[in-house]
Image (spheres, grey):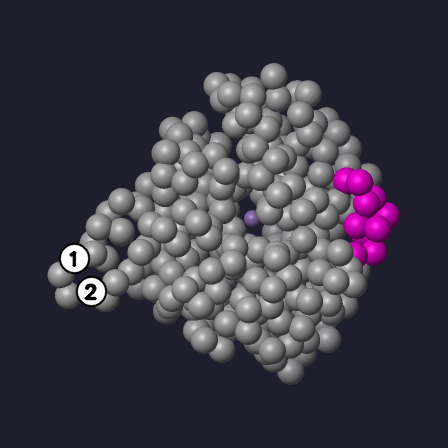
Amino acid sequence: MFKKMPVIAIEEHFWDHELAAESKGSEGVRSPEHLKRLYDLSELRLKEMDEAGIDIQVLSHGAPSTQKLDASIAVDLTQRVNDRLAAAIARHPTRFAGFAALPTANPEAAARELERCVKDLGFVGAMICGLTNGMFHDDERFWCIYERAEALGVPIYFHPSFPDAGVSSVYYDKYAKEFPQVVRAAWGYTVETATQAVRLILSRVFEKHPGLNVVLGHMGETLPYQLWRIDQALKRPGHDVMHFRDHFTRNFYITCSGHFSTTALVCAMMEMSMDHIMFSVDYPFVANKPAIDWLETLQLSHTDMQKFLNGNARKLLKI
Ligand code: MN
């Protein structure tokens, strides 16, 4: 059924040579197969999109992107990364769209870069990967970015990165050698990114900026499953008024990047509605084919499938 529908995948990564060279430690190390695909923004990528039936990739720089750059170099380097991404999109404008990288070490400059990327380069939003040099993004110093995103009508996608070193040593070190993914996709990414989202809501940034839209990958980083309990617990005696569920279901969108579970999708549909869930793969860390194979098994209505594969993305990202 879905094969007649356009497919937009919205958490699909590339790497920029100059930025990747700044990535220290194990985050900068990837397998040759991943590297080949991260650096390709033409033949191989398009061939693998065609084979799977993916019409459009919304491209974003892979983690940690620009979030671990020192403020002294972040602004100029991020502009060059965004300019090079814009040039790659311009070579295949019907197949690619882009999320801006932001030099969050300098929040005011990040807000200006977001505006430049949307207005001058045609980008459809921005992606922030992990913490900015150890800092969560609910801090008010980052709110100028959200004010700009709200004014421009584009979302901010919060993507994981390597967990904070102190957290990692207490939570994961014992098992990290035997099971390296426990720090990453198996658990560490989700803990940090879900915490990022919870803190954003608690900061009341959505009360000040009710038009701010946020995207989470990986089927919402466990939050749809936890939503009832978080919302109920925050209403217990002794708490200030906090409408957690309202903010999560109005201001947040999720994607199924790297998480192709039908039971998890059904949970998210029941908590958030199909209007807030979008397809994505997480290429090249996850291959296109398993994602498409999963789509074939989904028993969704035509309307819901359309929203999932392209309608919601078109509306939110104005593609
Ligand atoms: Mn990803």
Q: Residue 68 versus residue 110: which sits nearer the camera?
A: 110
The residue lying furthest to the left in this view is 237
Identify residue for label 2. 239
Task: Where is residue 44? Give x, y as percent.
Answer: 77, 38
Which of the image's four quarters has the C terminus?
top right
Position of 6 relative to 13 (above/below): above
Task: Where is residue 183? Give x, y as percent.
Answer: 42, 53
Residue behind label 2 places its C-beta within 8 angstroms of ligand 1? no
Asked if the residue under mark 2 is in contact with the one under mark 1, i.e. CB atoms within 8 Å, the reply is yes
Which corner quadrant of the image does residue 46 belong to? Answer: top right
Which of the image's four quarters has the N terminus?
top right
Q: Is residue 150 visible?
A: yes
Identify residue for label 1. 236
Q: Residue 80 versus residue 225: which sits nearer the camera?
A: 225
Q: Residue 99 versus residue 207: which sits nearer the camera?
A: 207
Q: In this view, does 48 lie to the left or right of 92?
A: left
In magenta, the rendered stretch is: 86-95
Q: Which amino acid does label 2 sit on?
A: His
Task: Where is residue 227? Give x, y as percent.
Answer: 31, 46
Position of 319 relative to 130 (above/below): above
Q: Can residue 216 be seen in this view?
A: no
Position of 209 relative to 224 (above/below): below
Q: How far apart are marks 1 and 2 (CA)?
A: 6 Å
